[in-house]
Amino acid sequence: MTTVTSTPPTKPFSFSISNPLKSLTPKSPSLSFPPRKIHHHHHHNRLGLSINATVSSPSPIETTNAPSQDYRVEILSESLPFIQKFRGKTIVVKYGGAAMTSPELKSSVVSDLVLLSCVGLRPILVHGGGPDINRYLKQLNITAEFRDGLRVTDATTMEIVSMVLVGKVNKNLVSLINAAGATAVGLSGHDGRLLTARPVPNSAQLGFVGEVARVDPSVLRPLVDYGYIPVIASVAADEAGQAYNINADTVAGELAAALGAEKLILLTDVAGILEDKEDPSSLVKEIDIKGVKKMIEDGKVAGGMIPKVKCCIRSLAQGVKTASIIDGRRQHSLLHEIMSGEGAGTMITG
């Protein structure tokens, strides 16, 4: 492999501290530190700051809705345990769902990534791009077809998938992160042989849909060591050079395992794992592998959530410390998940 000799990015990080926390600063807050609900009696305490602040009665002399400087300093001070615990640790984030289509949510994810990078974490972003792929297929009068939640990918569709994911979605995300003050590098599974693909078992029905056969993270290490944020499109080639479309959750999980990541985070369009699928208030905030396997056996985890949960289980079994399925429809869900005791979804532990 070619040795990376480029110098570190000289552009200074510049971001507004108040921006990621803007929606989290009530008029006269008093910080609260509620314990996170532990499911199935698993006592893996979550470290960090409770983002959800309670609102006390306004002061008679209060004349503005803007948070005071003292409050901002207090928030930063309370972040110290989080910074100490996660500084230098790798966090792999799978980006998808509503967070990809809403400009406000996209901006929220980008600013969260930049903030996390600035305080010393090593974030890696993995993305798909289903809505964009569907739009371009429609413009070309090609019908999108799905089987068991996977896109049927013939040769023509595969060419469009590569063009959209690598050429459009990936570079757009890189540009947004760069504009926010960090420095991102766009990659796909092809680059540096980061991922080697193989066809899924039912490839006769699905076409060029692949799974991860091998991960070589060598190309990523110098990038994260120098402070870059890798942005990875979920396409890769097999040994013969044939391109495959790979599920982005799977790519994120396998990369997290290969890198020995501290956390795997999957952004989704659901609140997380629910004890009762019909009751949105029954969110399971923390659970271990044994507990979540039982939920699958009992039918409480079903449908599209099963492959996401299995992806998390596989990454945990390979050494990732925690894996979370979080609500990407929520502003600054990454900060809520990493920095608060409440979290933004379900955290699964080994």
Image (cartoon, rainbow, N blue to C red):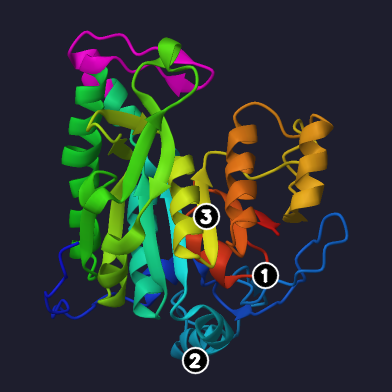
User: Which of the labelled discs sits on residue 70, or is there none?
Assistant: 2
- Residue at 39 percent across and 80 percent down: it is 120
Counting labels gives: 3
Q: CA distance from mark 2 to mark 1?
A: 22 Å
> How far apart in space, not on screen, are marks 3 and 2 (Cα)?
32 Å
Mark 1 is on which residue type? Gly
SS category of the residue bearing label 2: helix
Dot 3 or dot 1, earlier in sequence? 3
Compared with residue 108, is residue 281 higher up or lower down, i.e. above or below?
A: above
Q: Which residue is mark 1?
A: 341
Q: Residues within 10 Å of mark 3 (few under 14, many from 20)?
A: many
Residue at 21% over, 59% down: 185
Which residue type carries mark 3? Ile
Which residue is labeled 3 in the image?
Answer: 265
Instruction: Magenta stretch: give its range.
Output: 135-156
Q: Give residue 169's mark.
A: none
Image quarter where the C terminus lies is bottom right
